[in-house]
Image (spheres, coloured by chain):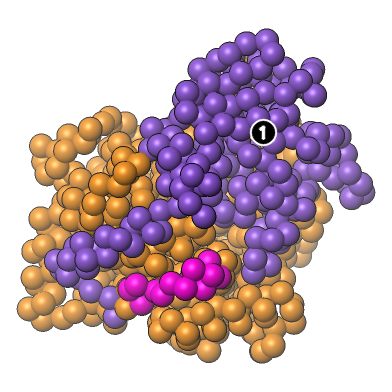
Chain colours: A purple, B orange
Amino acid sequence: MTVEELAVQRVTGTGVAVRGNDVDTDQIMPARFMKEVSFENMGEYVFYDARRDAAGELNDHPFNRRTGASIIIVNKNFGSGSSREHAPQGLMRWGIEAVIGESFAEIFADNCTAMGLPAVTADQATVERLQAHVEEHPNAGLELDVERARVVTPDEEVTVEIDAAAQEALVEGIWDTTAIMQANLTATQTVARRLPYTGR
Amino acid sequence: MSERTLYDKVWARHKVADLPTGEDQLFIGLHLMHEVTSPQAFAMLRERGLEVAFPDRTFATTDHIVPTEPKARERPLADPQAETMLQALEENVAANDITFYGLDSEYQGITHVIAPELGLSQPGMTVACGDSHTATHGAFGAIGIGIGTSQIRDVLATGCVATEKQQVRRVEVTGELPAGVYAKDIILQIIRTLGVDGGVGHVYEYGGPAIEALDMEGRLAVCNMSIEGGARAGYINPDATTYEYLAGRPYVPDGEEFDALVDDWESLRSDTDAVYDDTVTVDADGLAPQVTWGINPGQVVGVDEPVPAPADITDPTARTAAEKAIEHMGLTPGDPMAGYPVDVAFLGTCTNGRLSDFREAAAILEGMSVDPDVWAVAVPGSEQVRAACESEGIDEVFLDAGFEWRRAGCSMCIAMNQDALGPGEVCASSSNRNFIGRQGDKAGRTVLMSPAMVAAAAVSGEVVDVREVAT
């Protein structure tokens, strides 16, 4: 794919609010589903346990009620714990195209960027207002403008924070860094040779 | 920004280029790998027709899905998914000339246990692994970072990650640990103080007299749980303890080459006038054994302290989180964790699955019996740890007390093999995460603590202050 095709300038769609601080990646993707050697089915397993009651029946979890949503709105320290990319892969394969939250765990945010999935932050009051908006007006829709770092709803337009490097990577379509770094192979080998330690 | 810290020096040494995004291209000197997060990365490599750039710097083992019951390790594994996953790793390492310590190796074990004991992890390195506990290797004065699968693909294909330099927080641990209180208690106290997201945007440099007094295994336990505090990496400046541990290990050069390395490692220590982005102090004097009461590793109290009451918490979101934790754990606010009944005792993991951990627990278990209502499981972090324990007769102490004695793996820390909590069971655990569902059933409950505290809980049938059990 070309950088134009990979570029993520804006995400538009309906939203889903998953409330609570410290939603760890074990909750987003329980470990037992990581026994599959591909990410293909992860969309089916996202929030698997949280979406079911003690008897195993689907409960009223937002992901059960808001199928079709493309923007998830979360609170503080979302994606903490395990580095499993299975978590953001599951969100993306379920249909999520952008994440708005109060804050993210570092590895989770890096995984999102490495997958071309925007993860932006806003203060607590703004996030809670956006959550209330999508809960009260599930079909109203909203837009994340990555380039301008703005979230637009029918009620308001707010500024969000996005890591400058992630923003550049998304807007320019250069979030897949393999080819870019591979082009620096000679410089990499020079760095490797200069190190006082080798491999085996 | 920080200046003249070990982090700054190691970063400068490994930086390859400025990327167009504004990130740095950072060379990874040691890439560790396990079966769960790597198959998708190899698949991406194959799709793109790419090869592994630095197979000589890549080392793999199998830990997450392996059975720990000795007879269950026969191939094919009983769980077809686990067998498929293990075969995928075996094929990938063979096709790409990657060193692999598999189930038939005397060095098999948890990635973050075997790399230190093999001498693979050394001061001044950059270490990456598709596992959040890669911070463990910071105990040597290395930068260890956990990465996701897309970044594993990058490291495989290019030897590098695209990343940004972070702020450096000095975590100064003053004083001296009392008897019966361990490295695990220090790190739980740090996370309790700074919060589970306190380290976001930072790496932690642990130092001060209580850190310097720790042996390497204690330092590994501290750095291991950096991620539980939100810090992607944590490290300790190398010193004589570090060099003594490394000397003579399989991947560590000897003779003059070793002496030259020590000189280099000394030069990497943070300078006395290093600049930190901030400094926090935690006191080890008078520290009590720490235990978790909730569902994240920052919900910690001293074993005799009252569990906090949600009603006393002013921030509404934090109050909701505490209410959820109290409900999940079935606790009464105001009661201490001492006396909380346990069903399972689990000893092992990349945090506390090393020889000293089993020695400390064995010292408690000697001549004692596990409570008849407790299922107690000891899982050495590596086959080398198991062998060392067995040569000291530690396995006999565990077996005589009523523990099961297993083979190496991640086991009930993540419950991807047969070892798991059942509904409602409470586990006294030497692991690192008390998240809902982490150890198996989503109604299972985890209380994190030191290995000695796990042994004390096993014999008492409830959470107890190990200092009251120790003989």
Horizontal and vertical percent position of residue A24: 61, 43
Amino acid, disc 1: Ile
Residue B287 visible in image: no
Q: Where A187 sits versus B317, above or below?
A: below
Q: Magenta stretch containing residue B46, yes or no? A: yes
Q: Where B403 sits versus B132, above or below?
A: below
Identity of the residue drawn at 35% across and 35% down: B282
Q: Where A25 sits versus A135, above or below?
A: below
Residue B276 visible in image: yes
The residue identified by callout 1 is A72
Horizontal and vertical percent position of residue B183: 40, 51
Q: Where B121 sits versus A99, above or below?
A: below
Horizontal and vertical percent position of residue A146: 51, 30
Q: Which residue occupies the extreme top position in the image? A: A155
Q: Magenta stretch containing residue A114, yes or no? A: no
Horizontal and vertical percent position of residue A102: 55, 26
In terms of image quadrants, where is residue B287? top left
B383 and A145: which one is in front? Answer: A145
Magenta segment boundaries in residue numbering: B43-55
* Horizontal relation, residue A52 to residue B237: left or right: right
How many numbered callouts?
A: 1
Identity of the residue drawn at 73% across and 29% down: A14
A130 and B171: which one is in front? Answer: A130
* Horizontal relation, residue A50 to residue B24: left or right: right
* Horizontal relation, residue B371 to residue B238: left or right: right
Identity of the residue drawn at 57% across and 54% down: A85
Instruction: Tell me the element at label 1.
Output: strand
Chain on which label 1 sits: A
Identity of the residue drawn at 51% across and 47% down: A6
